[in-house]
Amino acid sequence: MSSDAASNQTPEDALGRLAAVIESRKPERGGNPDTSYVARLLCQGPDAFLKKIGEEATETVMAAKDVDRADTAEARAKLVGEVADLWFHTLIALAHYGLRPSDVIAELERREGTSGIEEKALRKVRRREGK
């Protein structure tokens, strides 16, 4: 890919490409759990990849706390790495449930410009109303 083509890529493109790789590793698409970490997690079922999401979320929090204690390039790089791991495992969960990064991006776009406090209150009302 030329540097011009790469500069035209968006983060959504990168997430979409990664999601396509994950999709291709699904066991029903020929993903081999002996040679693919993604296929192995998917074969083990939701408990396996959901546990990894929990672990990566905890590691992300710990890495963020390290940045709070000592804001160094190394600490920031560790935080980025942990968030990448968290996103990766979350993409596996989305694939398992038939969802794509574009579904999450659409939800974020829907929320754009809405106060987080208002959004949370609206979700509580909807839950109470059974919507």
Image (tube, rainbow, N blue to C red):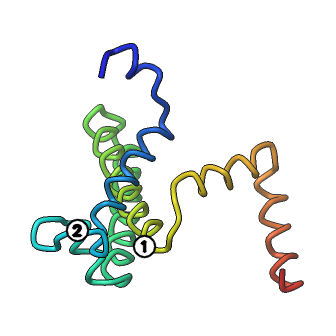
Q: Residue at x 32, y 54 (%)?
A: 21
Rendering coords of residue 98 (x, y %) = 50, 70
Do the numbered discs 2 and 1 sit on residues whose CB atoms are within 8 Å? no
Q: Is residue 1 above or below residue 120?
A: above
75 and 21: which one is in front? 21
Quarter-wise, where is residue 123 in the image?
A: bottom right
Mark 1 or mark 2, which is nearer the start of the sequence? 2
78 and 97: which one is in front? 97
Q: Is residue 21 above or below residue 8?
A: below
Mark closer to the observer (2, 1): 2
Question: Farthest residue in the left direction?
Answer: 34
Is residue 109 left or right of 45 when viewed as pictured?
right
32 and 89: which one is in front? 32
| Badge 1 amino acid | His
Q: Residue at x 38, y 59 (%)?
A: 86
Rendering coords of residue 57 (x, y %) = 40, 64
Q: Mark 1 packing: few (<14 Cα in 10 Å), some, or many (20+)?
A: some
Q: Which residue is mark 2?
A: 31
Q: Is residue 15 above or below residue 87?
A: above
Question: Farthest residue in the front direction?
Answer: 29
| Badge 2 amino acid | Gly
37 and 75: which one is in front? 37
- Secondary structure at badge 2 equals loop
Rendering coords of residue 24 (x, y %) = 31, 60
- Looking at the rendered image, the quarter that the N terminus falls into is top left
Q: Residue at x 33, y 83 (%)?
A: 45
Q: CA distance from mark 2 to mark 1?
A: 13 Å
Q: Which residue is mark 1?
A: 96
- Looking at the rendered image, the quarter that the C terminus falls into is bottom right
